[in-house]
Amino acid sequence: MKLWDKGYSIDEWIESFTVGNDRELDLKLAIHDVRGSIAHIAMLESIGLLTFQEHNVLKEELLNIEKEIEEGKFVIEPGVEDVHSQVETLLTQRLGDVGKKIHSGRSRNDQVLVDLKLFYRDEIKTIARNVNALFEQLLDLSEKHSNVLMPGYTHMQVAMPSSFGLWFGAYAETLADDMLVLRAAYDTANMNPLGSAAGYGSSFPLDRTMTTKLLDFGDLHYNVVAAQMSRGKTERALAYAINAIASTLAKFAMDVCLFNSQNFAFISFPDELTTGSSIMPHKKNPDVFEIMRGRCNRLQTIITEVSSLTTNLPLGYHRDLQLLKDITFPAIEQLNECVRMCTFMLQHVRVNENILDDKRYDYLFTVESVNRLVMNGMPFRDAYKRVGQEVQNGTYQPMRTVFHTHEGSIGNLCTEHIRAKMVLAAGRLL
């Protein structure tokens, strides 16, 4: 059954090519399609396009369909084009002609937009919860290992003292920054397009403010053309958020792969969380983080996919936009899985507390030595030259202590401030 059926059949190959796997993806929208329809019929009843009794009958059956969806009993039947058609078909089969009235005042264009925005809102909140759990895990590790020193690097050369407190805390605060981008994506999705119909509004006296309130949208897409133009804009904003989080995870995964190697030996994981080699008996590979790095690097490309798909499309709806679901739906799933896996792995990470006992890290403390001389009154350039000459002559002897007290340094991690930053960044996502 097709909502646009005019009494003729379409070529099967054409249908297969244009529909693709959209039915499978649409199942994720089913619950939102029903909830959008419940709000829509309430509005139709308020403006006299449904009677009180018709509204109640339709609402009761929509709630029944909602229950079937939650129980996993809802399917899009063969020959039914999409989730919207399936819901309307069920209503018509079960209620008769009153089921046909549900589409008054809307098009599939604004219907799918509502479904997607409701879906993206829920998914963004799920991402936010998962990111926050990883954030808390990182901050807990930062506090737990705040006094354990490790080398800091620039240009992949031993540079200055760092600490596990700084390392874990750095990624936690970066996730707080990423949450700002995620919240922007949520705000973009949190606007109601219902009533924009095919993109040019309706001659029915629709109450779009009413559906905005019923669906708990933050605001209304006022201009009906702008509402339709938001298809692709929402996905682009979400793609940027996914990119931000994925880039943080990919960088962290790279660190883990390095620091877990024998040449670094900063951290390790239990045997059961690593994999082995078919010919090298000693190998304990960090495959989880290698896969995570690869997946997150791929996730960073979806901005290009979304942008390429939507760039220079003229005004109005185009079937190209259907393909956005192919990009964003799997990306959301993969990002969530990577974030959850990272949180799990960090619950089992082991930190080497004796890294700096190795003499290869002696020069890590040259800046500390320079600063100590400056604090005792020596001009900086003279202090720098003295320590530099000691290094050149092979006479440098480090004092393996650090005295960092300013905000965000080894001795003052500011974890509570970072927590407050995350709360502010997340807003009502958590």
Image (spheres, grey):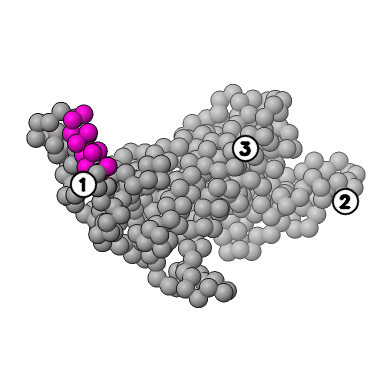
Residue type at the position of mark 1: Tyr
Q: Count up the numbered dots.
A: 3
Using the rendered image of the protein, determine whether residue 276 is visible from the camera's viewpoint: yes
Q: Which residue is mark 1?
A: 396
Q: Are circles 3 and 2 on residues that touch, CB within 8 Å?
A: no
Placement of 210 over or under 73, stated as above or below: above
> Which mark is on residue 12?
2
Q: Which quarter of the figure has residue 324?
A: top right
Frontmost of labels 3 and 2 is 3
Of the pair 284 and 54, the residue shown nearer to us: 284
SS label for mark 1 = loop
Q: Which residue is mark 3?
A: 304
| Residue 188 pos. (x, y %) | 51, 34
SS label for mark 3 = helix
Real-space Cα separation, disc 3 to disc 1, in angstroms: 51 Å
| Residue 238 pos. (x, y %) | 54, 40
Of the pair 294 and 230, the residue shown nearer to us: 294
Of the pair 412 and 56, the residue shown nearer to us: 412
Q: Residues within 10 Å of mark 1 (few under 14, many from 20)?
A: some
Question: At 21% from the left edge and 29% from the top edge, which residue is drawn?
Answer: 381
Let me know if residue 391 is in the magenta part.
yes
Q: Position of 211 compared to 92: left or right?
A: left
Q: Position of 327 compared to 96: left or right?
A: left
Residue type at the position of mark 2: Glu
> Which mark is on residue 254?
none
- The residue range painted magenta reads 381-392
